[in-house]
Image (cartoon, coloured by chain):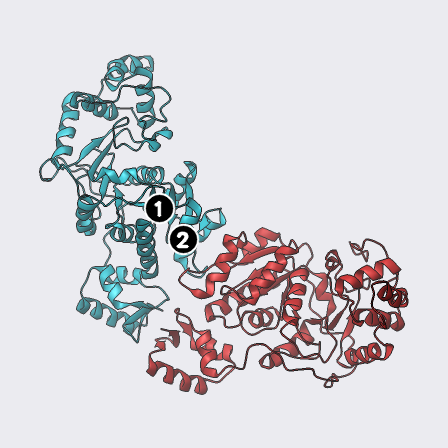
Chain colours: A red, B cyan
Amino acid sequence: MKTSLFSYPTPFTPPTTEEDELSFLRLARSRRVGATTFHRLLTEHGSAQAALDALPDVARAAGATGYSACPRSVAEAEWAAGHRAGARLLLPGTAHYPEDLLQFPDAPPLLWALGDPVLLNRPRIALVGARNASSLGLRMARKLAEELGKEGFTVVSGLARGIDAAAHEAALPTGTIAVTAGGIDVIYPQENKGLAEKIAKMGLRLSELPPGVEPQARHFPQRNRIIAALSRATLVVEAAARSGSLLTARMALDYGREVMAVPGHPMDARASGCNMLIRDGATLIRGAEDVLEALGAPPETIKPVKSKTAPHGPAPAPAAPASPPQTAPKTSLRNRLLALLGPAPTPEDAVIRDLGTDAATLSRELLALEMEGTVTRHPGGMVSRG
Amino acid sequence: MKTSLFSYPTPFTPPTTEEDELSFLRLARSRRVGATTFHRLLTEHGSAQAALDALPDVARAAGATGYSACPRSVAEAEWAAGHRAGARLLLPGTAHYPEDLLQFPDAPPLLWALGDPVLLNRPRIALVGARNASSLGLRMARKLAEELGKEGFTVVSGLARGIDAAAHEAALPTGTIAVTAGGIDVIYPQENKGLAEKIAKMGLRLSELPPGVEPQARHFPQRNRIIAALSRATLVVEAAARSGSLLTARMALDYGREVMAVPGHPMDARASGCNMLIRDGATLIRGAEDVLEALGAPPETIKPVKSKTAPHGPAPAPAAPASPPQTAPKTSLRNRLLALLGPAPTPEDAVIRDLGTDAATLSRELLALEMEGTVTRHPGGMVSRG
């Protein structure tokens, strides 16, 4: 099973030297060379260097004048920045690049990897969901991630707020992969900085973009495609209609991967995306057993997760940060608190943890909301909306 | 479409006189003549009277000695009791007996009907669910019954506590059928007496048992089979695993009818039956639109529901009550209250209505439960469990 380039239609020379890696980087970063074109050029020309040599002619034949490939200096700078960040480059044909990605024509030409790439060798499942998840949703995400992790699955997600973060956190002891929308050394959202650092130590972070790139809106769907392609199944834990998680699920469907969803009551708006997926044929998931029933238990035994092996020095700040992320604006504690609460009473402890705040701050905020009648405190340290 | 005996394999003489009805009653009430045997004898012998004449020979051939059919006097007593109760007898081959029942070999040989049999002429949908439903479940049942009623469906259910009662109540203005497990003149549970009377006036009650029979445990599955057979689809609104509603759904499946269910969060035990059905292939229902999408809107226009036409005098108490019902014991207000509440806050008004109690009584009970920490009161007159 571990023959490389298993799915590549024609063999090419896998990169073995730093020089080869630079050629891959140059080809991947050349203008107009998207993921699909990258793979086509590589197989047509047999190696990245040969493809680079042919690029000007290819461009001329396509009517583009004055075309030149990505300069070697740019590739060198990216190579250096990645290694300064402690990351390594995973390229098609090398040991840790997941060969099952190569069945998709738009597989990432390269992945910067920070952490333990051995996690890629285990069966992977994506757990994704709403950023403004309810505490019930967060609890479900944690439970599923923990149980699937114990069963030997690597839990893949997007390091977003809410469901993603809860799934990563719960899967840290068993193994988790965060695919990020910015460069490997760029952490977004900032509130997940601590989690991102833990994942680099105990799990694995992946990015297909050059180090230093700040995430832009258009990067998120591209990142979602990698999550979907990496995972045997994409499980949506809580999602409203028209949410990003549904796009990931749709990509999983396009890729012929399993799609699964946790149902909810139709009168709960945060269940609407999941209920819609189930109506469209996604497997209804009540717990980890349902996932195992659909996928079968992973064949491999669980390997202990090692911390990353060969960091190339500490990771200083990267080169040139691009424009700021164009996603959700910072939200106030009040709004984040309200987003966490649903009609079902939730332990205040859980809310404190989910918010990353302290009891006194939460208490002040709750008091104000309670006076308004927006939030209710219950005996036993529970709190709910409504 | 209204040709009678549409599904009967061989024609027989439909009953037209009181004498014919008595023969049907005698045949149906004869020992060892179950529903399936009844239909076989009827088609083999061409009429109920001919089947009765042949019964002793049939019994002898089967090795039963000293067999005699149900005495005429017993049939006469049932006939009189039914009519005293204001009911009419629906027999296969007569105007209001639903011909689509006859595709099932165990279709009821007869139905006592109290109310407006015209409701049988419209497309029927069963709404069933938990007796100890949550207020969220009751709200969903009411909403579905009301909306499907407005779309021209007759709402069929079993007059049980909880979801059944809520569905009947909400469908009263548009048309509802209660299939009961006891005789047509026996109301069970007693708390639904008022509702049962309203259904006899504005809707229709059906029973296949002789008047005066108190419901026994074994009658409930028999009754459920009629609900399933009568309905184009059986929609389960809220049901725990291993509940009676699931048996009705299973019968609907056996009969080749559609099964539908309202999902819920996996951490809510009252959703487990429904989630299980959806995993097994039932259609996930978020609202009336989903039902209409699955079934198509009913072809007929909505006829105004008439109150019953020709009652044969008021309904006095029936003849001989049998043993008391062997179903759920009476529960205390406290338990009924707890059963109504879930993690989602519910308006106290709704709880008062669902319990059929008054504000002062509820308030006393809530106070005690709140002190224990079992229940929480929320601003805006809301209350929840937990």
> Where's residue B276, x and y in %?
46, 50
Residue at the disc numbered 1: B244
Image quadrant in which the C terminus of chain A is located: bottom left
Residue B189 x %, y %:
22, 48
Circles 2 and 1: CB distance less than 8 Å? no
Would you say residue A9 is visible in this rendering? yes
The amino acid pointed to by label 1 is Gly
Residue B364: x percent and y percent? 20, 70
Pointers 2 and 1 within a single chain: yes
| Percent coordinates x, y for residue A382 in the rendering | 39, 75
Chain ID for label 2? B
Q: Label 1's element?
A: helix
Horizontal side of B132 relative to A48 (left or right) equals: left
Marks counted in the figure total 2
Which of the two discs, 2 and 1, sits closer to the camera? 2
Task: Please give left or right for residue B268 compared with residue A115 in the image.
Answer: left
Nearer to me, B274 or B241: B274
Q: Residue at x 31, y 30 (%)?
A: B2
Q: Amino acid at mark 2?
A: Glu
Q: Which residue is mark 2?
A: B289
Q: Decide which of tag 2 and tag 1 comes sooner along the chain.
A: 1
Q: CA distance from mark 2 to mark 1?
A: 26 Å
Q: Chain of mark 1?
A: B
Q: Quadrant of residue A118?
A: bottom right
- For residue A155, above or below residue B94: below
- Observer able to see residue B240: no
